Amino acid sequence: MVSKASTAQEVVTKRRVFYVPGYDPIHPRRYRELYRKEGASQADVSGYSLSIAPKKTHGVYGWRVQAGIEGESVQTDFEVLVWSDIVRASMVDSITSTYILMARTVWVYMSSGALWRLMKLRKGPVIAALYPVLMLFLQAAIAIFIGYVAAKANYTLLALLPFVPSVFAILLSVGLSVVIIVAILSFFKKLDPKLFVYYLMHDYSYSARSSGANPPELEARIAAFTELVGQALADDYDEVLVVGHSSGAHIGVSVLSDVIRAGAVSEGGPKLSFLTLGHVVPMVSFLPKAWRLRADLAYLSTRDEIFWLDVTAPGDGCTFALCDPVAVSGVAAKGKRWPVIISAAFSQTLSAKRWKELRWKFFRLHFQYMCSFDHPNDYDYFRITAGPQVLEKRFNGRRSSQSRLEKPVNKFTSVEP
């Protein structure tokens, strides 16, 4: 079944965008402010108009965009598919629990062989995954070393006092060491808004806890997202666009697979489009029990009901840049059509000055896909989400990057238990 815009010729006047964030505990207003600020900046650079207003649709959180782009007036209703509450609930508060999560996560990725296979793709995201592990080890080593030195000095001092029993001196020194270790680890934890160690550890441990299977609470949320997208497809929009960023990309894959399976895409309805940005799909699909995700990747990649564009950039060290998420996961089937894979080419689309400023700000660069560019090429987030062309028409005839990686390196390719 194909939609009314399958020929990708109609001008879009009304669009519904569903944005699926990555593993992010922060309130979704962050995305509204990012869109407002960066959209205004891109409009100034590119010479079009774009403004946002309060939302007019049902949903948890969103906004309305009114744009004048390419000589057309377009209204876009944005909706953030919120799962930040699930993220917050998964982020254990204690230091001890975080170290236990670290041990479990390392064990899952190493014992399954996923870590070594991921390194065959791109080293950047693997280094990003190892960063919190190494930092937690380093923090523990620093704390233990200082605690040991303090305990030894304290024992030496007490040993000089003839009225202090040796056993008491040992116990007091050990107690002092424990207090110092806890204090130093607590200090490092307070620095986490700048270091991102605990945040990233919780991120990578979320999927590893169940070896790639979706936890029940996430499955329930995917079902709710599926219903929302299905309702929009029954409305009078010209295009329904689902945008998945980072971990939100693989959630979007499952949502859209369920939408299509449910028969929600109908002849004469809105065009269904899918945009994935900075994906980290292999971090999940390479795990033993990621049957649901692998099945959805295989299914969605062959469907006529959608147009799927995947955008990454080699300058983003937190993504599997130009890696075909379907092919490298080992589930590319005969008749595979999607995704079309292109590069945002940060080193070319950002000015030399901005590229120099952002090049080593890895987490900021991971969000650049939703920001303004000094020299935008065919990828312009705001033209895509608020402009008068459906995604398929905007990228009609665009071929995937010749630098893409398609070699299947995943050991686990089964799509059912």
Image: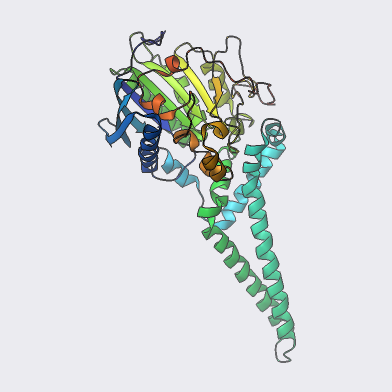
Please name whichever residue, 239 or 94, is drawn nearer the observer in this view of the structure. Answer: 239
Q: Residue furthest bottom?
A: 163
- Asked if residue 139 can be seen in this view, the reply is yes
Q: Nearer the viewer, residue 174 or 248?
A: 248
* Residue at the image position 61 percent from the left and 10 percent from the top: 334
Q: Is residue 113 left or right of residue 176?
A: right
Quadrant in the picture for the N terminus: top left
Q: Left or right of 137: which side holds 244?
A: left
Expressed as whole percent of the image width and height from the top left, the position of residue 99 reads 61, 53
Image point 63% across, 54% down: which residue?
136
Q: Please provide percent x and percent y for residue 299.
A: 53, 16
> With respect to residue 87, does 335 lie above or below?
above
* Residue 22 drawn at (x, y percent): 48, 37
Quadrant where the image shows the C terminus: top right
Q: Is residue 206 visible?
A: no
Coloring scheme used: rainbow
Q: Is residue 61 above or below residue 339?
A: below
Query: On the image, which quarter does residue 141 sit in?
Result: bottom right
In the rendered view, tell whether residue 305 sits above or below residue 283. above
The number of discs equals 0
Q: Residue at x 56, y 15 (%)?
A: 399
400 versus 56 height, above or below: above
Q: Provide residue 113's location: percent of width, then percent of height.
A: 71, 34
